[in-house]
């Protein structure tokens, strides 16, 4: 995942257990890159993804509810931006 200038969030919609699709895959890639998810991305928000989101939330001092709402999405964007060098 790369942070793109002008993109406020990497994950653009709320996600929770049972969600599927590209946004879930992007979330899983992020969680794997940050060592919170130990399995390959599937695009399905199931138990291991819930656990990985909770792990990320705890590490970031967020409410660890396993869902990806506004605060978690903003923190993901912040972490991605901080780890991506600015290109002039």
Image (spheres, rainbow, N blue to C red):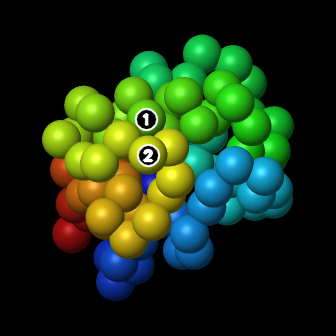
Residue drawn at point x = 35 percent, y = 78 percent: 8
- Badge 1 is on which residue? 54
Quadrant location, the C terminus = bottom left
The location of residue 47, given as percent across then percent down, is 69, 30
Distance from Cα at disc 2 to Cα at disc 1: 6 Å
Give the mark nearer the N terminus: 2 vs 1: 1
Q: Nearer the viewer, residue 61 or 40?
A: 61
Q: Nearer the viewer, residue 79 or 84?
A: 79
**On the image, which quarter does residue 74 sit in?**
bottom left
The location of residue 40, given as percent across then percent down, is 73, 24
Residue drawn at point x = 43 percent, y = 35 percent: 54
Q: Which mark is residue 24?
A: none
Q: Is residue 72 above or below residue 74?
A: above
**Crowd tier of the residue under label 2, counting other residues whose Cα lies within 10 Å: few below 14, some 14–19, many 20 or above:** some
- Say if residue 40 shows up in the picture: yes
Asked which secondary structure carries label 2, the reply is: loop
Asked which secondary structure carries label 1, the reply is: helix
Q: Which mark is residue 65?
A: 2
Residue drawn at point x = 36 percent, y = 57 percent: 72
Does residue 66 appear left or right of residue 62 in this picture?
A: right
Determine contact: label 2, label 1, CB under 8 Å: yes
Q: Is residue 18 above or below residue 47?
A: below
Q: Is residue 58 above or below residue 84?
A: above
Does residue 16 appear left or right of residue 20 in this picture?
A: left
**Crowd tier of the residue under label 1, counting other residues whose Cα lies within 10 Å: few below 14, some 14–19, many 20 or above:** many
Residue drawn at point x = 18 percent, y = 41 percent: 61
State the count of labels.
2
Does residue 10 appear left or right of residue 16 in this picture?
A: left
Does residue 52 appear left or right of residue 34 in this picture?
A: right
- Nearer the observer: mark 2 or 1; the answer is 2
């Amino acid at each position: 995942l790369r942070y793109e200038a002008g993109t406020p969030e990497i994950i653009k919609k709320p996600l929770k257990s049972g969600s599927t699709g590209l946004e879930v895959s992007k979330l899983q890639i992020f969680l794997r890159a940050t060592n919170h998810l130990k399995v390959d991305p599937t695009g399905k928000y199931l138990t291991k993804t819930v656990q990985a989101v909770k792990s990320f939330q705890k590490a970031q001092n967020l409410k660890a509810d396993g869902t990806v709402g506004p605060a978690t999405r903003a923190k993901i964007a912040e972490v991605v931006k901080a780890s991506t060098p600015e290109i002039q």
